[in-house]
Amino acid sequence: MNEVEIQRQKEIKEAEELLFTGPQALGFAKGLFLGRFVADWAMPYPRIPAAQQAELDKSLTEIRQLLDEHLDPVAIDRNADIPRHLIDGLARTGVLGMTAPKEYGGRGFSQRAYCKILEEIGARCASTSVFTNAHHSIGIRALLLFGSREQKQRWLPPLVTGEQLAAFALTEEQAGSDAANVQTTATPSADGSHFILNGEKRYITNASIAHVLTVMARTPVPGSDKTAITAFLVTPDMPGFTMLEPRMEKLGIRGTATGRFAMRDMAVPKENILGPIGKGLKVALTVLDFGRTTFGACCTGGARTCLQLAVEHANRRRQFKKTLGDFDLVKKKIGRMAADLYAMEAMTAVTASLIDRGLEDYMIETAMLKVFTTERLWEAINDAFQIYGGSAYFTDLPLERMLRDARINQIGEGSNEVLISFIALVGMRGPGMEFKEIYDTMFNPSRGLGKAWTAGMNRLGAAVKIPSVPVKSESLRSQASQLGRLIWRFNLSVNRALIKYREPVMDMQLVQERIAGAAMEMFASACVISRLDSDLQGVSQNGASAPASRRAAQLFLQQSFHRIRRFLSELTDNDDAELLATANSVLGKEEQPGSNGR
Ligand SMILES: Cc1cc2nc3c(=O)[nH]c(=O)nc-3n(C[C@H](O)[C@H](O)[C@H](O)COP(=O)(O)OP(=O)(O)OC[C@H]3O[C@@H](n4cnc5c(N)ncnc54)[C@H](O)[C@@H]3O)c2cc1C
């Protein structure tokens, strides 16, 4: 094995330890990669129980009133500050501790219900939704998920009521997308009572206004020269904590305080460790799963505002003696926005309910939701901007601010490129392991046939059986059967890619992008079918059974099925070799003979 191969095996082993912890129920996305439609996770469309819905409606009324009276997104952007009276209002209405258990002062809301609240905030002001997310979705999340009873009792009550604020600090200069490359060190004191933290964190939302920060730092692994990441609770009054830049000047979400801070010989009691020592990366990734879910909700809210603005303008503005809405190229944008919005809402609801219903591993689904909603919001803003023409460019309308605010979404909480690669690789691991089992047994028959036989039957079963997508509404049967066929085709394409490329597929991001893209569209389509089925059966809670909404859903399915077919056909019909060769020559990279442009 050469050095690169040794490093690769090490990375695979580390990722496996991190992501795959023993037998779990098969999730929806992993099922897709195995050629199965695991209906139970997506169908029936998740409903909020009546008692919880009443509580949610009450909260939404209160929050809408607060936002109407106290939220001024223009002033927040101009002053680069979220005023205290708004934060106090969010605290008073329970938003800052909504999913925390009631025993700690929270409202005990489900993720599904909380997402409805964040949709509402995201529809109005991205600074405020990102602030809320940083505090609640990720700031206090590690404490909620991994804190001991004593830690929760000690730290949670003031955070949950909003008396104190929280932040989540992972990113550093050398640890951006490569989150595992944290350089901040945490060295145990001689008596073992403390850890001494040294390092710097940057781009941290709420850093300068937070009273408690979850900080990731590297601790020694006992009995070896290795280190591993551990999560610590840190307070800014700890000697050695220095705020280097409390509010970094920035393009969008200007109301949020994005900070950079240093920790110099800062002693943190060992009681402040969250979760098992050395398992901080697992803590961080789990926390980010929650962040990505509420991210989806915020983007969905933003997309709803875009559609509203676009419709208003298209019906009002006249050119060439017609309203803009009379032109097909404007209709094209509005139709697509409505279709995508329907899907964003459905995907957010289904993903949040996976968490509520206790699926253990929903990392692929939250990554899909994050990539899908952030990309579609960006398109929606771009389209609404175009419909407004020159007027969108000026600061008296919200679109230039929305455009600036939305740009971070494709970068933060895992850049979309990293997540696309993650979706494809983690998804392909299931069928990949089955092929490995078959292959290893072929070359070493003494291993016995048992596991290889099961793996072979699974692969064969998926290759011959088209999965069934169960729907109640007669009018949806055709779409359901098309989705089933596409899942079957997708499975064959994944198998083909695994057999053709084998391990090098791990570096082939253009192949991964198509596989992840198709999987993401299939997940979105499944959520749309589930929601539409429920709308058609008259059990929707969203009042969304109006004809325009149903049409939007049907359009989404048509467009999504086209995109899936395109992704799959481009796996074999593409210009990857030329593209990579061009990029390599522009980047000044030497071309390897026979590298196919890689
Ligand atoms: C306003 C704002 C708020 C933030 N809030 C927080 C916070 O509260 N807490 C926190 O910990 N962090 C926070 N961050 C940090 C954010 O999560 C990082 O910016 C993000 O993870 C990307 O890291 P990076 O900026 O170092 O970019 P890099 O890692 O340098 O990546 C730059 C680009 O390179 C590409 N790229 C990188 N790796 C790959 C790959 N493997 N394959 C293909 N392409 C790749 C992607 O296009 C990526 O966008 C915030 C950032 C901003 C701007």
Image: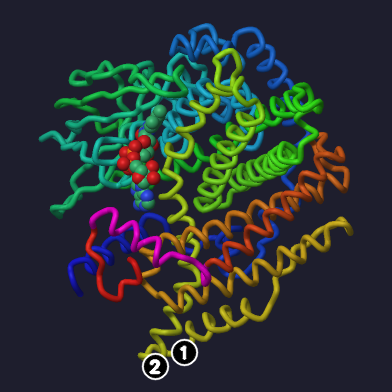
Q: Amino acid at mark 2?
A: Pro
Residue 577: percent from left, percent from top: 39, 67
Q: Indicate if the residue with disc 1 has its beta carbon within 8 Å of ligand 1.
A: no
Decide: marks 2, 1 in contact (CB < 8 A)? yes
The quarter of the picture where the C terminus appears is: bottom left
Which residue corresponds to mark 2? Answer: 445
Using the image as rendered, state which of residue 319 and residue 418 is in the foreground.
319
Magenta region includes residue 572: yes
Residue 346 vs residue 148: left or right?
right
Which residue corresponds to mark 1? Answer: 449
Q: Indicate if the residue with disc 2 has its beta carbon within 8 Å of ligand 1.
A: no
- Looking at the picture, does residue 120 appear above or below residue 373? above
State the extent of the magenta-drawn residues as a range. Answer: 571-588
Residue 383: percent from left, percent from top: 63, 35
Q: Residue at x 42, y 43 (%)?
A: 415
Q: How is the image coloured?
A: rainbow
Using the image as rendered, state which of residue 257 and residue 326 is in the foreground.
326
Q: Amino acid at mark 1?
A: Leu
Residue extending furthest toward the front: 320
Mark number displayed over residue 158: none
Q: Residue at x 86, y 47 (%)?
A: 536
